[in-house]
Image (tube, rainbow, N blue to C red):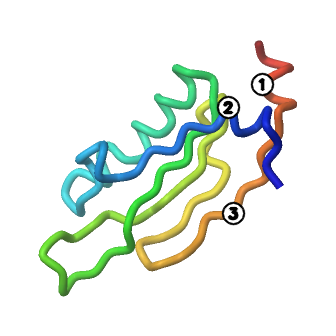
Amino acid sequence: MLTHSILRTLLPLPAYLLHTADRRTGPLHWELLARARAADNQVYVGMCSPARDLSAGYHAWGHSMVVDPKGEVIAQTGEQEDIVYADLSTFPLQRDK
């Protein structure tokens, strides 16, 4: 269960806000942007992307992920529909600040 202190340190970023989550630009930018936003702001970042559907007009990159405040990916999915599970702790935030 997320506590109030964890919720204050979580930045959710949906793919449609970043415009970099298709099959062409996803491999180049997706993880880099997540890691940079987490390290810049010293928060957990949740990157949310739709699953890849090659029959649709837009081919999403997929690969939803959670990145910790140090910029390390702690959980990631593939291109298929899935749920990201990650244990979030305020300990790294308190220790590193």
Q: Which residue is mark 1?
A: 93
Query: Marks 2 and 3: which is nearer the front?
Result: 2
Give the residue displayed 40% in from the left and 51% down from the top.
14
Q: Secondary structure at mark 1?
A: helix
Query: Where does residue 93 sit, x and y in percent of width and height?
Result: 78, 25
Q: Which mark is residue 50?
A: none
Identify residue type, mark 3.
Answer: Tyr
66 above or below 43?
below
Q: Quadrant of residue 94?
A: top right
Q: Is residue 64 left or right of residue 49?
A: right
Query: Marks 2 and 1: which is nearer the front?
Result: 2
Q: Is residue 89 left or right of residue 67?
A: right
Real-space Cα separation, disc 3 to disc 1, in angstroms? 19 Å
Q: Is residue 30 left or right of residue 6?
A: left
Q: Quadrant of residue 77?
A: bottom right
Mark found first going from the N terminus, 2 or 1: 2
Give the residue displayed 67% in from the left and 31% down from the top.
9
Query: Where does residue 64 sit, x and y in percent of width and height?
Result: 48, 59
Q: Quadrant of residue 29?
A: top left
Identify residue type, mark 2.
Answer: Thr
Mark found first going from the N terminus, 3 or 1: 3
Q: Residue furthest top?
A: 97
Give the class, few, some or many, for how many residues have Cα within 10 Å of label 1's Cα (few <14, many ≥20): some
73 above or below 92?
below
Identify residue type, mark 1.
Answer: Leu
Q: Along the line of sight, which residue is nearer the eye, 93 or 76?
A: 93
Q: Which residue is mark 3?
A: 85
Give the class, few, some or many, for how many residues have Cα within 10 Å of label 2's Cα (few <14, many ≥20): many
Real-space Cα separation, disc 2 to disc 3, in angstroms? 17 Å
Q: Are marks 2 and 1 in contact (CB under 8 Å)?
A: yes
Give the class, few, some or many, for how many residues have Cα within 10 Å of label 3's Cα (few <14, many ≥20): few
Q: Which residue is mark 2?
A: 9
